[in-house]
Amino acid sequence: MPKIPQNPSKQPESQPQLESQPQPKAQPQQSPQPSPQPVSNDASVIHADEARGVGLSGAGVDLSGAGMDEPGTGMDEAAGVLVPELSAEAVADAVAGDDLEPLDPSDKPPATGLTGIAPGTELVLTADDVWAGTRLDVFLARTFPDQSRSFLARSIEKGAVRVDGVVSRASLRLRAGANVCLTVPEPARTGPEAEDIPLVFVHLDEWIAAVNKPAGMVVHPAKGNWKGTLAGGLKWHLERAASGGSGLSVVGGPTRPGIVHRLDRDTSGVIVVARTEEAHHALAKQFEQRTVAKTYLAITQGQPQFDRDEINLPIGIHPYQREKMAVRRDHSTSRDAVTRFEVLERFRGAALVKVAPKTGRTHQIRVHLAAIGCPVLCDGLYSGRTRIDPAFFGLPSGGSEAEGPLLTRQALHAASLAVDHPVTRERIEFTAPLPADMQHLLDVLRA
């Protein structure tokens, strides 16, 4: 194995620069303190003075709102590019919907915080007269100065802050005596933990790696999937092996070390990983310019009409089911999508199809094959089946329940991926053999 380069550690994200703001006229030199307000027994009331000196650095709100198979990321099982994300501060400012009012550090109260308080605990503060007319997010930022403005904006947007019992916007101007209730959020996730997960590397050098991802593995952490991810395994195998330095690119952010593109959880096959920032940008550009050659193998439910064809149908978010995508024209989420396919073998009620996506939309292959009446076999979202038994094809079960189903995940495999090496510029192709479950199904169909 080539010597692993030592990469500089990722620098912490900078907080938004706070501009000055005039002092409240009522008490220009005074630092106002929210006063306590009695609440019911299931809520904790904390005055700013009582929480003094306690940090809030570990708290945060998860905004992903989606597992790996959910739309809205601009990525899919067709290896869509993962574009480097905006900073959390920029995203939160956009979510808040209004320009943030500048703060004046000189009139902040003493540091307060919530470390050690259980998530879900309700804390109530009362806005005194001097806070009248102050924005909600500014009030919270001054009350908890150890927290970033973006964290507080995300908390408000997620409904974790109520004013007089009503979920409010960050731009709300407080009235004198208003009760502000903050529900302590879950701690923020900063990245996957290194996990000793077996990985099959089909290529490994100082700049890039390629892995044969098994079905059932999520590529990077997301809501509900913090453990057992490819990213966690990569950190174990590559970062731990890099003496004194990072073995993965940090361009994608702390939860996506080295991740340039992705495969859906139940899609197996080749995925390429960046080990340096230079390599990450070079690979991302190739995905963006569509010079990456991707080939998939799919077993379809039913047979395509033609042996070879091109599917050119726009894809957008499904109008009713948020976890699905759909063929949609003239919609704000619609994007052009092109998929070429070739039928390799035909069986009774199924076919083995080679698929070459030319674009990288969310669930593109799955949506396009379903659109021509031949969804990927055992695709729970688009075929309606999550289990395929021999009886589905009119085959005998063999008389033994121990044999189990023929397939329990979507029959889609990323067989090959060709890119230009980001350093040598040489065209290099990574391949992964058909996994055992799909191979067994083909053997049964061929018998």
Image (cartoon, rainbow, N blue to C red):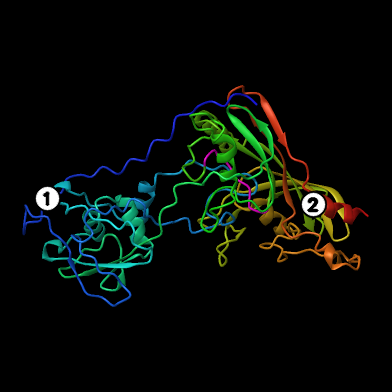
For disc 2, the neighbor class at 10 Å (few under 14, some 14 to 19, many from 20) is many
> Quadrant of residue 260 in the image?
top right
Identified at 58% across, 35% down, the residue is 238
**Please, which residue is most extreme toward the right here?**
447
Q: Is residue 145 visible?
A: yes
Question: Along the horizontal axis of the image, is 203 left or right of 59?
Answer: right
Question: Along the horizontal axis of the image, is 101 left or right of 405?
Answer: left
Span of residues in magenta:
257-266
Q: Pointer 2: what residue?
A: 438
Residue 321: x and y in percent read 57, 66
Q: Earlier in the sequence, mark 2 or mark 1?
A: 1
Residue 95: x and y in percent read 37, 55
What's the residue type where badge 2 is placed? Answer: Met
Q: Pointer 1: what residue?
A: 22
Instruction: State the separation of the CA atoms marked 2 and 1.
Output: 67 Å
Q: Main secondary structure of the magenta part?
A: loop
Are dots 2 and 1 in contact, CB under 8 Å?
no
Question: Along the horizontal axis of the image, is 132 left or right of 229?
Answer: left
Residue 65's label in the rendered image is none
Question: Along the horizontal axis of the image, is 376 left or right of 166?
Answer: right
Membership of 262 in magenta stretch = yes
